Image (cartoon, helix red, strand yellow):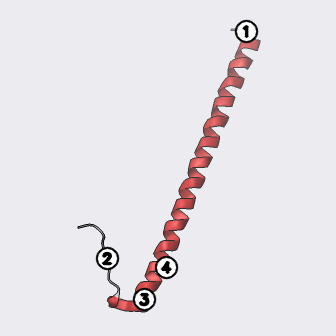
Amino acid sequence: MDTAQLKQEFEKANAKLDKLEALRRGVEEEYQGERNVLEQQETYWLGEKKKWGDALVVVSTQP
């Protein structure tokens, strides 16, 4: 391979790495968003439990 071919292969590899990095960041941001929502829900329900004490009953819609 000559220098031009090596440079072209290097640029292709870098483009693939950039795409993978963008995908990773997207997945990471989505995961963080889901985690934030779950933490907010947990905080809410812990507050409700503290407010109601042992009177809080979990109702399941499953038979």
- Which type of secondary structure does the marked residue at label 3 adopt? helix
- Residue 11, x across and y down, in percent: 72, 24
- 20 or 52: nearer the viewer: 52
Residue plotted at (32% across, 78% down):
58
Task: State the CA–CA distance, disc 4 to disc 2.
Answer: 17 Å
- Residue 16, x across and y down, in percent: 64, 30
What residue is pinned by disc 1? Answer: 2
What residue is pinned by disc 4? Answer: 44
Residue plotted at (70% across, 16% down):
6
Task: State the CA–CA distance, disc 3 to disc 4.
Answer: 10 Å
Amino acid type of the residue that numbered disc 4 sits on in the rendered structure: Tyr
Task: State the CA–CA distance, disc 3 to disc 1.
Answer: 71 Å
Mark earlier in primary sequence (4, 2): 4
What residue is pinned by disc 2? Answer: 59
Badge 3: few (under 14), some or many (20 or more) residues near its Cα, within 10 Å?
few
Amino acid type of the residue that numbered disc 1 sits on in the rendered structure: Asp
What residue is pinned by disc 3? Answer: 50
Foreground mark, 2 or 3, reads 2
- Which type of secondary structure does the marked residue at label 2 adopt? loop
Task: State the CA–CA distance, disc 2 to disc 3.
Answer: 18 Å
Residue plotted at (68% across, 30% down):
15
- Relative height, residue 21 to residue 50 (above, below): above
- Residue 32, x across and y down, in percent: 56, 59
Quadrant in the picture for the C terminus = bottom left
Foreground mark, 2 or 1, reads 2
